[in-house]
């Protein structure tokens, strides 16, 4: 097997379900230390974070990834054990193969090869890896970014290895992400018997007009390559389970994915104003997952476009779609951020996999990006 395939299999074999790193970062650290990287382990709460650097000064290029994975679900649903990497018909199967132990392995191999070829390279090459990307992301890169801000740690460019390609390796370059804001709304009424509605207040009925207005609103028409801001209701819960009881409370969970035309505070204010206008007795608990970020045209995008075009055979689509990534915590430090990784077809699914051919090309792709930026 190839060097990157060997390392990817070693990582997949470690059941690193969030936030348990299961020894992945120790393995990565030993490899990078042997290549001359300075190693710093940042244990924050129950989360492991690894910061490895080579060189000094500016510019600072960070390769950003995560070693944690989502639970595999029922193991009997998998063709092979999710934590026993297996190659079938040129495809590597295992939890994390695409999201994102394959990319992390490729980062390590690319970094080793680059510093071996250019031991006195310009600036700083860094690798940042966390075990808290798939979970609440509290003590992972979010926390590390706060520490970096306190230290004055500069980051110029950040390449995140999230699976971004659609059909062919390198056919999509992610140049930003929407913000994500979740609200948990509780509307208070008065419980009672359905035969005596005059003695109760049904929170479902009270909230319905406000929810209709909230879900019908058009927030914006998009921004640059961002699709329009959207709001989706994901959960509604009320009642005791009995058909003859008016519930006393209603709980509604909703999420907004929003463009740089908004920030979390502005959205929260707008939504409170809407519910206030309907004179509801309510409360909203907010969770701010991260603000949107966008990397404008410049050296990072230009270099990435050229390199990805070589691998995909044509210029990549440049997109801000998808969910969120840890780059949302690095961008506020002043960094330009892109996401480049393998095909996103099976992440979080049963029988998650990545084509071996793509995995073996990834280190060269990343090494070309590094070399052109730190030449």
Image: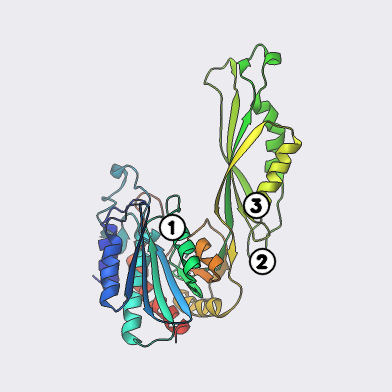
Q: How many numbered marks are there?
A: 3
Which residue was labeled with disc 2? 224
For discs 1 and 3, the disc positioned in front in the rendered view: 3
Q: Where is mark 1, residue-wise?
A: 345
Q: In the figure, is residue 68 to the left or right of 176? A: left
Residue lying furthest top: 195
x, y percent for residue 254: 59, 42
Tell me how far mark 2 sits from mark 1, CA to CA: 26 Å
Disc 1 on helix, strand or loop?
Answer: loop
- Near mark 1 (Cα within 10 A), the count class, few <14, some 14-19 or many ≥20, is some
Taking the image as shown, residue 200 lies to the left or right of residue 40, namely: right
Residue tagged 3: 265
Q: Nearer the viewer, residue 115 or 60?
A: 60
Contact check, label 1 and label 3, Cβ < 8 Å:
no
Report helix, strand or loop for mark 3.
helix
Q: Position of residue 317 (x, y in %)?
A: 55, 69
Which residue is drawn at the image coordinates 64% and 21% (left, top)? Answer: 190
Q: Quadrant of residue 243?
A: top right
* Circles 3 and 2 in contact, beta carbons < 8 Å: no
Q: Which quarter shows the N terminus?
A: bottom left
């Amino acid at each position: 097997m190839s060097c990157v395939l060997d390392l990817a299999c070693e990582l997949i074999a470690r059941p690193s379900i969030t936030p348990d790193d299961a020894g992945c970062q120790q393995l990565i650290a030993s490899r990078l230390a042997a290549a001359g990287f300075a190693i710093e382990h940042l244990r924050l709460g129950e989360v492991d974070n690894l910061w490895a650097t080579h060189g000094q000064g500016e510019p600072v290029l960070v390769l950003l990834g995560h070693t944690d994975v989502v639970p595999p679900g029922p193991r009997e649903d998998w063709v092979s054990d999710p934590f026993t990497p297996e190659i079938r018909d040129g495809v590597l199967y295992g939890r994390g193969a695409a999201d994102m132990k394959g990319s992390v392995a490729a980062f390590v191999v690319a970094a080793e090869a680059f510093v071996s070829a250019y031991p006195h390279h310009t600036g700083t090459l860094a690798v940042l890896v966390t075990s808290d990307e798939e979970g609440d992301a509290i003590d992972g890169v979010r926390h590390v970014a706060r520490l970096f801000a306190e230290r004055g740690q500069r980051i110029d460019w950040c390449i995140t290895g999230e699976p971004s390609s659609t059909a062919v390796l390198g056919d999509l370059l992610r140049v930003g992400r929407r913000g994500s804001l979740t609200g948990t709304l509780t509307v208070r009424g008065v419980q009672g018997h359905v035969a005596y509605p005059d003695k109760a207040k049904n929170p479902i009925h009270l909230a319905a007009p406000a929810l209709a207005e909230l879900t019908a609103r058009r927030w914006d028409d998009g921004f640059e390559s961002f699709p329009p801001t959207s709001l989706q209701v994901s959960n509604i819960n009320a009642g005791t389970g009995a058909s003859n009881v008016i519930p006393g409370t209603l709980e509604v969970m909703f999420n907004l994915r929003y463009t740089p035309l908004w920030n979390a505070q502005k959205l929260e204010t707008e939504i409170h104003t809407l519910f206030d206008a309907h004179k509801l007795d309510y409360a909203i608990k907010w969770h701010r997952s991260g603000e949107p970020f966008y990397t404008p045209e410049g050296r990072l995008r230009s270099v990435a476009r050229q390199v990805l075009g070589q691998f995909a055979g044509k210029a990549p689509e440049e997109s801000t779609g998808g969910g969120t990534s840890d780059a949302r915590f690095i961008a506020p430090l002043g960094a330009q951020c892109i996401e480049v990784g393998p095909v996103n077809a099976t992440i979080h699914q049963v029988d998650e996999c990545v084509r071996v051919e793509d995995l073996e090309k990834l280190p060269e792709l990343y090494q070309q990006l590094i070399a052109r930026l730190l030449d």
